[in-house]
Amino acid sequence: MKDLDNIPALMQDIGRRARAAAQTLAFAGAETKEKALLAAADAVWNRRAEIIAANEKDMAYGRDKGLSPAMMDRLMLDESRIQGIVEGLRAVAGQADPVGEVIAEWDMPSGLHIRRVRTPLGVVGVIYESRPNVTADAGALCLKSGNAVILRGGSESFHSSTAIHACLVEGLQAAGLPEDAIQLVPTRDRAAVSEMLTMTDYIDVIVPRGGKGLVGLVQREARVPVFAHLEGIVHVYIDKAADAEKALRVVLNAKTRRPGICGAAECLLIHEEVADTIGRDVISALIEAGVEVRAAGELQRIEDTVPATEDDWGREYLDMIIAAKPVKDIDEAIAHIRRFGSSHTDCIITEDPAAANRFFERLDSAILMQNASTQFADGGEFGMGAEIGIATGKMHARGPVGAAQLTSFKYLVQGDGSVRG
């Protein structure tokens, strides 16, 4: 039985076992990893009643904590969402194995043959809040990419994550892989997070998934490298050359489909030439859908809007609230996004290719879109099967982090008795 009172000792033990498992996993065959993931998917489906029962305990805990409706939605699991977890596991299982992939290959005049090949990072630490499906996504992607993983789920999703983790372990057992390849920190104690952030001997990279408070803490205190985004301050700009029907459909989906995810739209910028036509229709539709629209300038004349304040720019609501502002042209929209955005995801709605190109060239968000809902900012929707998170930094991984992004590379150099003159 693990000593849950001695957190430093607990975490050191988890770290040691993860490092040992990573050494085995690094050369596990593609078929073996695929077998583990398919067996885990079957286990999740077969044990769905247990997972839903565990999730009901978490939902009660969340209600007692006073979580917002959007956060409760992130936490909730039903049969259809469990089906989504199963499909995600199977999708990752079916992908090409990134480990050992030859990225580049060349010969040198000296007689050397050089290959740059993908190799696992080693041990990944994932710290996340609320969303229990991250347990499956992160476990699957790390396994696929040959990495051991230490999962530290949020206190809200403790029971759900534990139930899903048991299914992942069942998959490892079925494939004969070390159970320590996917470990879940078995305590809600926040001291475990602090320990993970300094475990440089055992953890190669930390991936935080959660709100600004969690990600900010990780970025400030981690001595281990971090893949992260601080916030998803997502903008949608309706250009003067926008198609009215596309604008309505895209903005409504971007805001209301799931307002509590990081790809949800938080600010709507509308070219002043269409503010009283397309803009009015879009804002009225948002209000009718139950969204509170905090409007600036002439948009305040639209019925049932609320006046915006300076605090509404650069704000991640994760709720049924959106800020809206008229802009005189695309350059003012770009300037606003540069000032208040978070380099996560931003979208332009336009039929003008020149406007779209200008938007794509002059902004440097990890994901830029044209005429598509920002809720597509997701590794599964990008064909990665799932994602461990979205990185907005510029080093190594950027945008949705899938299995390939959880690898580094090494050089394999072959000669024939070659010596350097």
Image (spheres, rainbow, N blue to C red):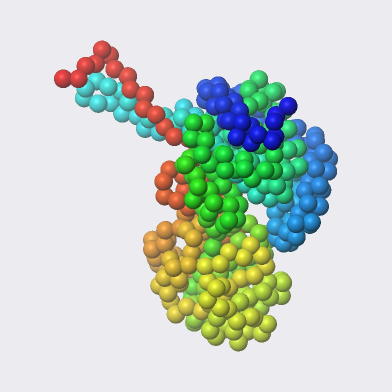
Q: Nearer the viewer, residue 266 or 80?
A: 266
Residue at image location 56% in from the left, 23% down from the top: 20
Q: Position of residue 204 (x, y in %)?
A: 49, 35
User: Is residue 136 placed above or below 21 in the rendered structure?
Assistant: below
Q: The N terminus is located in which quarter?
A: top right
Residue at image location 43% in from the left, 66% down from the top: 338
Q: Nearer the viewer, residue 194 or 334?
A: 194
Q: Is residue 184 visible?
A: no
Q: Position of residue 148 (x, y in %)?
A: 57, 31
Residue at image location 35% in from the left, 29% down from the top: 105
Residue 409 appears in which quarter of the rendering? top left
Residue at image location 72% in from the left, 62% down from the top: 68
Task: Judge left or right: residue 406 versus residue 93.
Answer: left
Q: Is residue 8 visible?
A: yes
Q: Position of residue 249 (x, y in %)?
A: 63, 67
Taking the view exactly as shown, the residue that stands out farthest to the left is: 421
The mark total stands at 0
